[in-house]
Amino acid sequence: MDFASIKRVYFLGIGGIGMSALARYFKSMDVDIHGYDKTSTLLTTQLISEWMKIHFDENTDLIPENIDFVVYTPAIPSNHVELTFFQNNNFNLLKRSQVLGIIAKNSKAIGVAGTHGKTTISTMVAHLLKQSSVDCNAFLGGISKNYNSNLLLSQNSKYVVIEADEFDRSFLQLSPFIASISSIDADHLDIYGDKKQLVKSFEDYISQIQKGGKLVIKKGLKLSISGDLEYYTYSLNEKSDFFAENIRIEDGYYTFDCIHPFGKIEDIQLGYPGLHNIENSIVAIAIALLTGVKDDEIIKAMKSFQGVCRRFDIRINNGKMIYIDDYAHHPEELKACISSVRDLFKNKKITGIFQPHLYSRTRDFADDFAKSLEMLDTVILMDIYPARELPISGVTSQMLLDKINLTEKFLFQKSEILQFLKDKSPEVLLTLGAGDIDQMVEPIEQIFR
């Protein structure tokens, strides 16, 4: 497809984080952008301010004429009025992953994959390259706080950093030059059926790495590696090709040395909190070194890295209370987030508000969710955010609450939570989840600022 001749593109689900990055990409090429999303959000408001035309009703009368192609996300239900209209009228329909694959084909793609951590890692990689002579383009799965965007562009760099999403096997549209895999924990079982099929999909992803390309994989992941490629292992502090040693806290920040096959980088200060983010930084540093980023550029960039919105995002730390917002929506992600909070704020009581995401995920991992949430002192559950799913009989937040072995546990509606927080005044507060819990961040901040 020749994108240079494109005049008008329609996005079905334009408010999604991945979709909005693509919309911004085409807008940068002076393409006329139209789109639909279910609800108005801060992100859609920003897109409208960037001269994109967006509506929030399933209404085919609002679809413009002369559309070159339609981009849609698998999160759009199959009976959606506008999707059905496009299908019945033979529009050129492309999935978001297909469009990314086309863009990546003409670049040296860096595909960052894994069931957890890929948004933070890809944003770190993009920042390391952006702050060096290597530079990059990037399509991110979150809003970089350094650049206030999920899209980074370069006039000169051959590299494009892409968050390689395993959902719906989207990452199989990519043939990366450099790939990384951070985790393969069971997830998206509504798509894969079982972990065996998930693992096979990651192995298929590895097989698509370009000839002579490179793979950076977390040590201990049991994956069959095939193809003509170089591969390296990484870990937090276990001896591998890339790992950290001499980890300590200096001036309130984690500082460490990175051991790698080509030498050692000393005294790297991570400007972003969370012990698990040291491990994320190790794989990001590995990728940066493989692209030619210099040691001094890495040290400078890691210190200035501000993180990603909704990824261990410290919203308030004013001496009276700490408030952190995080996208964690899988038991392992909850465990990593809460553990890091415990490590940072020792001896403080932690209150967590969790919104389960998807009925199927809640059903499949209910016991594991309960164990992770028991790491909190107080847990508040919200109703399950259904996203693309219909309810499943017997699967509710009450079912999950009953499994949690804590004295202080509650199930509240959104309207009840703010008053509870006013009365409780928690020492450390976490909001956790991938649904619309992000809409509570600003009201909570208003209470405690």
Image (cartoon, helix red, strand yellow):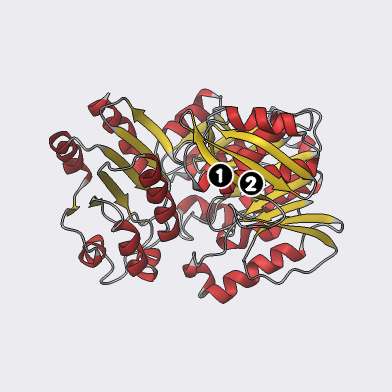
Residue drawn at x 82%, y 45% is 106
- Specify whether residue 112 is in view: yes
Q: Is residue 210 left or right of residue 183?
A: right
Q: Quadrant of residue 418?
A: top left
Residue 287 placement (x, y as % from top left): 72, 45
Per the model, the C-alpha gap separating discs 2 and 1 is 6 Å
Tell which residue pokes out farthest to the front in this image: 246
User: Dot 1, crowdedness within 10 Å: few (<14), some or many (≥20)?
Assistant: many
Asked if the residue under mark 1 is in contact with the one under mark 2, i.e. CB atoms within 8 Å, the reply is yes
Residue 25 placement (x, y as % from top left): 66, 34
- Specify whether residue 65 is in view: no
Tell me the residue that label 2 is attached to.
282
Q: Nearer the viewer, residue 413 or 286?
A: 286
Q: Is residue 221 left or right of residue 406?
A: right
Q: Nearer the viewer, residue 103 or 255?
A: 255
Residue drawn at x 28%, y 47% is 353
Q: Is residue 231 above or below residue 162?
A: below
Q: Secondary structure at mark 1?
A: helix
Q: Nearer the viewer, residue 126 or 45?
A: 126
Residue 117 placement (x, y as % from top left): 54, 50
Q: Which three-letter amino acid code belongs to the residue tagged 2?
A: Ile
Residue 41 placement (x, y as % from top left): 41, 35
Q: Nearer the viewer, residue 225 or 173?
A: 225
Q: Is residue 144 above or below residue 111?
A: above
User: Dot 2, crowdedness within 10 Å: few (<14), some or many (≥20)?
Assistant: many
Q: Which three-letter amino acid code belongs to the residue tagged 1?
A: Ile
Residue drawn at x 59%, y 53% is 237
Tell me the residue that label 1 is attached to.
278
Q: Is residue 319 above or below residue 275?
A: above
Q: Is residue 24 left or right of residue 385?
A: right
